[in-house]
Amino acid sequence: MDRAFIPGYGRRAQGGVGDPEPKEKFMIRQMQFHWKHFIQIALLVLLAGLIAAPAAADVGRVKVAKGAVHIERAGKTVPVSVGTVVQVRDTIVTGSDGSVGITFRDDSLMSAGPNTILTIDSFAFDTTTHAGGFESTLKRGTLTAVSGKLVKQQPESMRVRTPAAIMGVRGTEFAIRVADSAN
């Protein structure tokens, strides 16, 4: 690179004072200042994206848990207590003395009674338009629910699968019981 074309470079060799003119110094400092802030902002945006990505999978939170309750998530068993996060593809399992209450992002409420197996198949919710969908599968046990903003906006946006049928939820409250296949 030919340094003769860089302003202020080599002035000493050309018989100049040796330092760039004050205006050139100011411009160089401003360019360095802008690049420094640009890099800082880019790093903040990247960091915010990394923090927000895992939170996007969170669709609800346990509000009540009694007795034996756990979540099966990605091949692992997660013990449940108040505040435990519920994610898409989680399977909530209650024991013979267990029950759990979950509040979802659209303000839907689900309560599972003893000996229940409930899987959250999908959940999408736009907080601005209240559009989206909510699908779950009840393999066994009891489930009561109060629908939230999704069903108010789109009456058929919530579905519950059972071994015998698929329910499209249109109302605001419902209860389901699925008997154990051995009984």
Image (cartoon, rainbow, N blue to C red):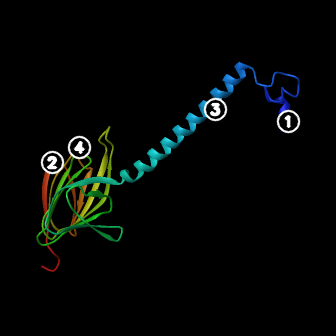
Q: Of the residues shown, which amino acid type is indicated by label 3? A: Gln
Q: Earlier in the sequence, mark 1 or mark 4?
A: 1
Q: Quadrant of residue 181?
A: bottom left
Q: Is residue 60 left or right of residue 12?
A: left
Q: Of the residues shown, which amino acid type is indicated by label 1? A: Asp
Q: CA distance from mark 3 to mark 2?
A: 59 Å
Q: Earlier in the sequence, mark 2 or mark 4?
A: 4
- Which residue position is annotated with label 4? 149
Between 105 and 175, the one nearer to me in the picture: 105
- Which residue position is annotated with label 1? 2
Q: Residue at x 84, y 22 (%)?
A: 16
What kind of element bears circle 2? loop
Residue 98 position (above or below residue 5)? below
Q: Residue at x 15, y 80 (%)?
A: 182
Q: Do tag 3 and tag 4 residues touch (Cβ < 8 Å)? A: no
Q: Earlier in the sequence, mark 1 or mark 2?
A: 1
Q: What is the crowding at mark 3: few (fewer than 14 residues within 10 Å), some, or many (at least 20)? A: few
Between 155 and 174, the one nearer to me in the picture: 174
Q: Is residue 61 left or right of residue 44?
A: left
Residue 65: x and y in percent read 16, 61
Residue 16 position (above or below residue 147)? above
Q: Quadrant of residue 162?
A: bottom left
Q: Do tag 2 and tag 4 residues touch (Cβ < 8 Å)? A: no
Q: Do tag 1 and tag 3 residues touch (Cβ < 8 Å)? A: no
Residue 179: x and y in percent read 13, 72
Q: Is residue 28 left or right of residue 135?
A: right
For residue 172, the mark is 2
What kind of element bears circle 3? helix
Q: Earlier in the sequence, mark 3 or mark 4?
A: 3
